[in-house]
Image (cartoon, helix red, strand yellow):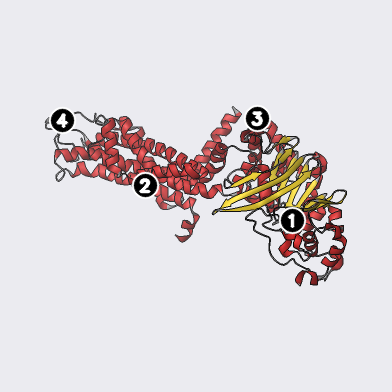
Amino acid sequence: MLLDVKNLSVIYRMDGQHIHAVNRLSFQLQENEIFGVVGESGCGKSSLIKALLRLVARNGSVVADSVSFNGSELLQMPMEEFRKSILWQKIALVPQSAMNSLNPVYKVGPQIVEAIAAHKQMPERQAREKVHDLFESVGLQKELFDSYPHQFSGGMRQRAMIAMALALDPKLIIMDEPTTGLDVLVQDKILKTLRRIKDDTKCSMMIISHDIAIMSEIATRIGVMYGGSFVEIAPTHDLFKDPSHPYTMGLTNAFPSIRELGKELISIPGSPPVMTQEEDKCWFEPRCPFATNDCQMTFPAATKAGSDHIVSCLRSAERKKLARLAKEKTTWTS
Amino acid sequence: MQTGNNRLIGILKVLHRQYKIMTSNTYGLIGFWVVAFFFTVALFAPMIAPYPIWEMQFDDQTGQLAMLQPPSLQFPLGTTHLGYDLFSQIVMATRTTVMIGLISGFISIMIGANIGLIAGYYGGLIDEFLMRCTDVLYGMPFLPFVIILISLFGRKIEFVILAIALIVWRTSARVIRAQTISIKQRQFVTAARARGCSHLRIIYRHILPNVLPLLLLYTSFNIAWSIVTEASASFLGFGDGDTISWGGMLYELWLSGKTRVAWWWFLPPAICIVALVTSLVFISRAYEEYANPRLRETR
């Protein structure tokens, strides 16, 4: 197991209020897999990444029973050690809107060379060769080495950022919305590149996105986030075939399917909760068509719904029936 | 050797680029050449000055002490009431003034840039502390502060330079802090943090190059301000007594009580101060246009 997160919470203090952005979240990440994290805006995806990379802003605090990466506890590690031995070396981030993540005043190639040389005490010549190889592996021409970021297209900058993330052969690459803002063809090429990199380097990837269609294409396993924790985690195929949480059912309804063209999409009414205190209840309850009185009083524990399929819903035993009902528009509107 | 050559070419390229920025408009062009002229004079001052500055001169024709003579062939800018040659004085004074301007200008931009970068980047208590220090300096009346510093430490040129630098940095610190705050929000800074870059590395490798145009603008501005301050302090008699500066020449004139008569004594230092400071401001403006392209469009 590469990463094991148990009961992770991220709490921000704002104007005397406590905002629970990530709420008792647990998940595991295996080696050499692509784990997709989906969820709508405000469900805590970005805070989860920040917590893992220990980049949470000063007004936020991170608590967890355990965040174990390759056997070492990430949150207990001294910051300096974490910064020097984990960040980028072991866990690399391709940030959201990678288009703006290159320093505009440096040329792209030298920028990466310099970063590597500083981090690894590698001779510059060797670092240069490394970057040439990286450019090749992410599909950038070598001639682009001495260009400035503004001369790159969005897709090229995304590739450059992926190259940067790969530079020190990390075990885990976290990608925050890697395809947002790119057109469909470029998206497709980037996804292909990612898949090839995963096969070549045997690293794991954690891809965060709100686009469930992209996820279905690339992820081997998907975690659905709602209200700051995973409500359902399942292998991609199982998740779409057998959605077990009402929120997942709603999400799959909200995306067009090529087989059911012309069918009206059903959206989930309401918006994600702002959690100002830790309460023992299901946070999806206000929007859930299947909610019962119990849902307001119990924090649903993760239960097994298949061999590798975990769901946090009190009514998960009735999931087949609920999934059928969820296909009807009237279920969501009434 | 190869890399040495490349480095030289790199430096030349950077300088050429700076020249292009400075001379991107007419005022900048004028400013650049006026400043270049004064710098050249300063560099070769001892070779240009025909007489020692504090030595009484005698008229070639009459053989008498050349007291308060208007410009002539022998004394191109006339003489003082003690028979000192004013042309030699102004040439040597250029050297002092340019040196004081450059050194205090650079010291002050170093202080200002670092305080601005650190305050802006770290924020919080550090920011609060550094900016309140800056505010305290803003509360100090400019000239009295310099004068007190100089009278405390003595009328030595080192202390004059230090006193000026200690007060001129305040505006550059504020402006660079503001720019730093804006740049640190940018995505590439977060990306650098996620790569495990240290704070110092982020400040000096990632943020500093992005505030560079502003930094150059304020370097030029600080040099100009330093020259003005030095002139004012010297005019009030707080310059270094062992060297001569433009402000010091005006001070001597004031002491002699010949201000109304000796226009040739009064005009050259005054014109030099105005010309050099204005030229530096012109250069600053060229940098300002470069740093803030919106100014270019409205012109």
Gap between marks 2 and 4 measured at Cα:
36 Å
Say which amino acid is labelled 4: Phe
> Which residue type does callout 3 highlight?
Gln
Distance between the alpha carbons at the discs numbered 1 and 3: 53 Å
In contact (CB < 8 Å): disc 1 and disc 2: no
In this rendering, the label closer to the viewer, 1 or 2: 1
Which image quarter holds the N terminus of chain A? Answer: top right
Tell me the residue that label 4 is attached to.
B58
Query: Would you identify the image quadrant in which residue A162 lies?
Result: top right
Labels 1, 4: one chain: no
| Residue holding disc 2 | B279
Residue beneath disc 3:
A121
Observer-side mark, 1 or 4, equals 1
Residue drawn where x is 68% and y is 63% of the image: A271
Residue B275 image offset from top left, x and y in percent:
32, 46
What SS does tag 1 mark? loop
Q: Are marks 3 and 4 in contact (CB under 8 Å)?
A: no
Whether residue A300 is visible, yes or no, is yes
The lab-note entry on whether marks 1 and 3 share a chain reads: yes
Asked if the residue under mark 3 is in contact with the one under mark 1, i.e. CB atoms within 8 Å, the reply is: no
- The crowd level at tag 1 (other Cα within 10 Å; few <14, some 14-19, many 20+) is some
**A133 horizontally vs B121: left or right:** right
Alpha carbons under labels 1 and 2: distance apart: 75 Å
Q: Label 4 lies in what chain?
A: B
User: Which disc number belongs to residue A298?
Assistant: 1
